[in-house]
Structure formats: C-alpha cells, structure tokens
Amino acid sequence: MRCPYCDADNDRVLDSRASEDGRSIRRRRMCNHCQRRFTTYERVEESTIAVIKKGNVREPFSRDKISRGLERACWKRPISAEQIRKIVSLVEAEIYQEYEDEVPSVAIGEIVMRHLAELDQVAYVRFASVYREFKDLNDFVSELRPIMRPKKRVEPLTERPGPEDES
C-alpha cells in the first residue's frame, strides 16, 4: 500500500477491524518512511453492476458518486462522516441484493432518498432538489408536503385494572 503522504511503498498495519456491518475491513496503517498514519478499507470485489442513466447510457456503479452526492446534501448539517458511510453501505448492499447486472439510476436515487429522509429532512430536500431537478418553488413545496404532514399521535395505553386489582 502506498503512503498517501510521501508515496513510499513501505508501511505496517497497526490495527484491523471489521467495518460496515462486516462487509469490509478497516486497517489503520503507519508509513515506515514518514511515520504518518492513514486508514485503508478492504472490500470483497463484487461483480460490477452497470447503472442505466438517462438516455440508456450505462456506466459502472460507484460508491464514491453516492458518497459525494450525500456529502453535498449533508453539508453544514449535523451528520457525521460515519453516518454518510453507513448510508452508502446500506444503499450498496440493497442494490447488490436487488439487482444482478444493471440498476436504473432512478432506483439508486430513490433508495438514497429513503435513507436520507430517515436521517435528516433538510439533507433529504437538498438531495431531492438535485436528483429530481426542481425547476421552481412549486417543486420544493410538492416534495415538502408529505414530510410536513402532522404525524398521527398515538395515545399511550392506560392500564386497566386486572381482576386482582379490583377490591
């Protein structure tokens, strides 16, 4: 592994542990040349899935593209890098579970939006505005309407006295 700081090809592994629900291994390394530390991830190389974009253009699936989109949507939001990595891993796992050779980009966007909606509503709307190509304010309002609906409030169950409580 080449050091990202000095480009030397001489390092040692300080720590290894499972990451992303056991789908990868996180290795903490130290360069023997410059003594700086860095992290690498090792994943099983899965068969590549092609993403079908608009106009039937196909390109290889990329975790990095999903990550970059999420980072832009979550910019200045209280969302950690670890939470973004977790969403990327969940999205990737879902894609590899549901699709074999090809996946429409629309399906990827919907999966990402579903996970973002659970995490942060502002990031969700930011992502949706780019993904769905909002043209004006009405598009924003249409997207916001479902998430602004008041949730039905469930009343707590009150305990009924049992036969032994009736005296």
Image (cartoon, rainbow, N blue to C red):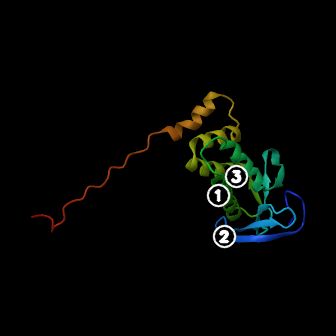
Measured Cα–Cα span from mark 2 to mark 3: 22 Å
Tell me where residue 88 appears, x and y as whole percent.
68, 56
The residue type indicated by label 1 comes to Lys
Tell me where residue 8 appears, x and y as whole percent.
90, 63
The residue carrying mark 2 is 22
The residue type indicated by label 2 comes to Gly
Tell me where residue 128 appears, x and y as whole percent.
65, 41
The residue carrying mark 1 is 86
Tell me where residue 111 appears, x and y as whole percent.
65, 52
Q: Earlier in the sequence, mark 1 or mark 3?
A: 1
Q: Secondary structure at mark 3?
A: helix
Q: Secondary structure at mark 2?
A: loop
| Numbered disc in front, either 1 or 3 | 1
Residue 148 as seen in the image, left or right of residue 88: left
Task: Report the residue at 70% width, 46% height from top.
Answer: 71
| Numbered disc in front, either 2 or 3 | 2
The residue carrying mark 3 is 108
* Of the pair 136 and 124, the residue shown nearer to us: 124
How crowded pointer 3 is (Cα within 10 Å; few <14, some 14-19, many 20+) is rated as some
The residue type indicated by label 3 comes to Ile
Q: Earlier in the sequence, mark 1 or mark 2?
A: 2
Seen in the picture, residue 79 relative to 3 is either above or below; the reply is above
How crowded pointer 1 is (Cα within 10 Å; few <14, some 14-19, many 20+) is rated as some
How crowded pointer 2 is (Cα within 10 Å; few <14, some 14-19, many 20+) is rated as few
Q: Are marks 2 and 3 in contact (CB under 8 Å)?
A: no
Seen in the picture, residue 25 relative to 76 is either above or below; the reply is below
Q: Are marks 1 and 2 in contact (CB under 8 Å)?
A: no
Residue 73 as seen in the image, left or right of residue 57: left
